[in-house]
């Protein structure tokens, strides 16, 4: 009987799960879940008031981009640019919508022609982003997150 009691105690002592705290188990589950999340994709894109949050992600993205491009277009129409040559160029604007819905320019990628003929272009785009209507941030699992975006702007002087 004594050998059976010692064997039972050894079996109990050798079981690791009995000594692992609930906090450690929870942390292990959380770590496993975090590794499974695709951090390069959001559940809901940033949205303007005119966009419907109940539509698909692709429709949300399209509404966000179209609203943004319309805003850029209206801003650029307010300016009268004097150009030496006809211009048909593509400019890429990289910006971030932070988790508070604030928009900031990260980079404006343009070629030499735009740089020489429209040197004030960066400032116009930066001011345009500051005058955007309110933006709801992107959501990942219901939590507001920062989102990097890239929008192509086609400049055509015709």
Image: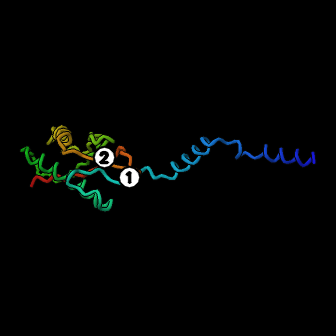
Q: Position of residue 140 (x, y in %)?
A: 39, 50
Q: Position of residue 24 (x, y in %)?
A: 61, 41
User: Which residue is drawn at the image coordinates 52% and 50% (left, top)?
Assistant: 33
Q: Is residue 58 left or right of residue 67?
A: right
User: Which residue is drawn at the image coordinates 16% and 40% (left, top)?
Assistant: 124
Q: Which residue is mark 2?
A: 137
In this view of the protein, which residue sits in the foreground, 121 or 125? Answer: 125
User: Which residue is drawn at the image coordinates 32% and 62% (left, top)?
Assistant: 56
Which mark, by number, is residue 142?
Answer: none
In this view of the protein, which residue sits in the foreground, 42 or 118? Answer: 42
Q: Is residue 134 left or right of residue 97?
A: left
Q: Position of residue 71 (x, y in %)?
A: 16, 49
In this view of the protein, which residue sits in the foreground, 117 or 24? Answer: 24
How dense is the environment of label 2, judged by Cα within 10 Å: few (below 14), some, or many (20 and up)? many
Which mark, by number, is residue 42?
Answer: 1
The image quadrant that residue 59 belongs to is bottom left
Residue at the far front: name it: 1
Q: Position of residue 111 (x, y in %)?
A: 23, 46
**Is residue 125 something one can see in this rendering?**
yes
What is the secondary structure assignment of the residue under circle 2? loop
**Alpha carbon of mark 1 to alpha carbon of mark 2: how far?**
10 Å
Nearer the N terminus, badge 1 or badge 2?
1
**Where's the C terminus, which quadrant?**
bottom left
How dense is the environment of label 1, judged by Cα within 10 Å: few (below 14), some, or many (20 and up)? some
Q: How many marks?
A: 2
The image quadrant that residue 129 belongs to is top left
What is the secondary structure assignment of the residue under circle 1? loop
**Is residue 115 something one can see in this rendering?**
no
């Amino acid at each position: 009987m004594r050998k059976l009691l010692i064997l039972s105690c050894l079996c109990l002592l050798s079981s690791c799960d009995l000594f692992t705290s609930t906090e450690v188990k929870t942390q292990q589950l959380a770590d496993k879940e975090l590794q499974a999340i695709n951090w390069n994709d959001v559940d809901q894109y940033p949205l303007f008031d005119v966009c419907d949050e109940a539509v698909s992600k692709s429709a949300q993205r399209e509404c966000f981009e179209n609203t943004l491009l319309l805003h850029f277009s209206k801003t650029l129409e307010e300016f009268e640019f004097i150009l030496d040559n006809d211009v048909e160029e593509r400019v890429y604007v990289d910006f971030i919508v932070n988790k508070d819905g604030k928009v900031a320019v990260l980079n404006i990628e343009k070629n030499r022609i735009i740089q020489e003929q429209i040197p004030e272009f960066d400032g116009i785009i930066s001011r345009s982003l500051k005058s955007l209507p309110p933006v709801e941030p992107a959501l990942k699992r219901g939590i507001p997150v920062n989102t990097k975006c890239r929008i192509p702007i086609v400049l055509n002087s015709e």
